[in-house]
Image (tube, rainbow, N blue to C red):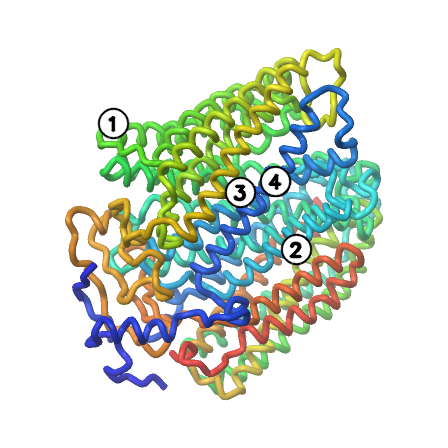
Amino acid sequence: MTRDGDEFRDSSMGTAELHRRLAAIWSTPSGLWGALSTVDHKIIGRRYITTAFVFLALGGLLSMLMRLQLAQPEARFIGPDRYNQIFTMHGTNMMFLFAVPVMQAMAIYLVPLMVGTRNIAFPRLNAFSYWMYLAGGLLLWIAFVVDAGPDVGWFAYVPLSGPQYGAGKRADIWAQMITFTEVSALAIAVEIVVTVFKQRAPGMSLDRIPLFVWSMLVTSFLVIMAMPAIMVASTSLILDRLVGTHFFNPAEGGDVLLWQHLFWFFGHPEVYIIFLPAVGMVSAIVATFTRRPVFGYLGMVMALIATGVLAFGLWVHHMFVAGLPRLGESFFTASSMAIAVPAGLQIFCWLATMWAGRPVFKTPFLFVVGFMVIFVIGGLTGVMVASVPFDTQVHDTYFVVAHFHYVLVGGAVFPLLGAIYYWFPKFTGRMMSEVLGRWIFGLIFAGFNLTFFPMHILGLQGMPRRIYTYQPEMPWSGLNLFISFSAVILAAGFLLFFIDAIRSARSGSLASANPWGATTLEWATSSPPPPYNFARPPVVESLEPLSGDLETLPVASGLRVDRRELLTSSVVHASPEAREASPGDSIWPLWAALATTLMLIWSIFSPWAVVWGSVPIAITLIGWFWPKGVPEDEA
Amino acid sequence: MKEKIVIDLADLPPHGLGTASQSWWGTLAFMLIEGTGFALAIVVYLYLMSLAPPWPLDAAPPDLLAGTTLTVFLVLSVLPNIFLNRWAHQQDLRKVRIGLIAMSLVGIVPLILRAFEFPAMHIKWDQNAYGSIVWVMLGLHTTHILTDLVETLVLTCLMFSRHADNPRRFGDVNDNAMYWNFVVATWLPIYACLYWVPRL
């Protein structure tokens, strides 16, 4: 079946001829059909990142609406019902449509390049994942536009979200949006795990994996272990609402705290699903801009894994005021404080790296410095709210709002913005503006602290979360007005960031393959990379394959050029095992996603959708997997 | 950057089998996801039980006949499955075809037995929380039997088509066999939970 002739191999082929042949087999055809059926991880990754940033902008608009409303007491700009929808949408959108997807999206683009392979594992699943994510986002936002947006808070506690109080379909929209985003997140997690396990460049043994890739591997396992909990929870909620089950109904043996347990068993690891990729980004940026490897590689990897494990032992600290047994609360206080240990270890490793290196304060590095300051403050208030008596005081106040914005924006958005500046030349082939970058960092750093630090004080003064307005007698109006003005500075920083990104993508200065002098494999190929990433698979001989004055890259040959082929290697030592085919473009993932979307939305209204809606899904999946007699199917 | 060829891999096989294949690891990852789902369902069951002094709530313990018959059948079904797996390893197309037809039939029987399990619970999903979790656990597992059956049927058709004689297809059969073992293995704790925990 295999035609083993030298004319089909890259071994003795000239560079120009090799690139021509590889481009012919790996390129995505132009036009709409090509765009809809592509399975190139770089195109899907860019699409994912762009979509996530659109959701970030939309979520930011919602927060500005809230700041407008809260700028003065007794404001009548937004009514209570719409305000409930707005804060629910803000949280839901930022967590499920921005933070988690954007981190996974960065991995979709970067992990295959960093491990030196040509495409992600299961590239069609990757395409499917994007369509599911997009459909879930559209479902949520279209519902909001037609005044059917969820209004039960981003964690949708029962009984408020249950059949008794949550009339209409608003809570169902929330619950089903969960299904969409979790399906897409779980799909990416599986792809990343298999890409890291099986597709690493020859020689990239476990101790030579870049820290960003390690962080995404641990994150993917967190997704795999945590997200089933929210799917169980949201499915039970839909069942309670649609077919009259009693999971959360105390009158018939159910329990409302069951919801909180299930939600936070997912929800707490979720924080680390957002934070750990950021840790990886920080490590990559710190290494490049201090011109030395990150101090304590083994300790960093162990800290990542330890954080991943501990993340599952913290969820009850979100429920301290729910009336749980004292012993349980003490345990979760202890574990909540224990997780500060691996986090602290990582901070000290980065500080040591900066101390020993020669820091270059370019924009990506500025964002890392901003991350450290803000995240440490967020960590300190975290240790405070881990203590039950203190938490009881500030629970559901603006203190908690300040705390988690410090942790999430400081811990994830700052590293992410740094990462965008850092990898933008790889994504687009063009540099972002260094001058604007400094302004953007300054505006966002100042705007963020001016907006969120006063919220600590508001919280201590007793201002509750999620109120649409407050009375003039309360001592909160001055700080609220200050916060609203500060939010304009923060928004201006983000607006400038979007302008810089769009402008640079079109007309920024051209980037070389390795503009920062970095040492990981994604910089060994051109910016942006060709559709096949590497003309010949790189061979890795150290933790920093591009370190020193490297002029020649060690590579492997012997791969076929008449089908999409990449190397698979063993899990521990990354010894080559096979020349595996990588699936070509296909429209079927889009059809499968449309069929799944039909079933999921229909099932908000009728349980029979699960029966009849499964038929088109099965048909599209069979169409997807049935062999088409292409060279990629040969073995 | 210039390239220096340091290794030639032309002699590697054009497809990996078993732990060398991505789909084997992918199947494992999906089993981990679904296994977590099953484990959580059991946790919910035990959680609700811990809140309710009389358990099962307003119902007699489930009748054992249908569920136990199904359990015995599922355990026995692993036997032909092991043979099918072995034949797929040997890439013996004729035997694999026979094995797949056998496993397709084997996949239908538990669905019939399952139809008798739901009434044997003596409760409906909308009567109380006990009924809800019992139906969801049975339903969740039934979905797994059903999806594996559909996959086996499609594979059976595939192995009678012109695409059959291909190591990649035999790898698919191996992964499918592994998945059936998973469906059987996850049933055992659910069976113990549904049928024996109420009798403790």
Q: Chain of mark 4?
A: A
Q: Are marks 2 and 1 on the same chain?
A: no
Residue hosting label 1:
A355
Q: Nearer the viewer, mark 2 or mark 3?
A: 3
Q: Helix or strand or loop: what does disc 2 sit on?
A: helix
Circles 4, 1 touching at the beta carbon (< 8 Å)? no
Residue A432 shown left or right of residue A85 in the figure: left
Q: Are marks 2 and 4 on the same chain?
A: no
Q: Which numbered circle lies on residue A59?
A: 4
Quarter of the image with the N terminus of chain A in it: bottom left
Marks 1 and 3, Cα distance to the nearest angstrom? 31 Å
Residue hosting label 3:
A99
Decide which of tag 1 and tag 3 comes sooner along the chain: 3
Residue A217 shown left or right of residue A619 in the figure: left
Q: Helix or strand or loop: what does disc 3 sit on?
A: helix
Q: Which numbered circle lies on residue A332?
A: none
Q: Nearer the viewer, mark 3 or mark 4?
A: 4
- For the residue pair A9 and B161, the one nearer the viewer reads as A9
**How many C-alpha atoms fall within 10 Å of the one at disc 2: few (<14), some, or many (≥20)?**
some
Marks 2 and 1, Cα distance to the nearest angstrom? 59 Å
Residue hosting label 2:
B191
Marks 4 and 1, Cα distance to the nearest angstrom? 38 Å
Q: Nearer the viewer, mark 2 or mark 4?
A: 4
Tell me what residue is drawn at x 75 percent, y 24 percent.
A75
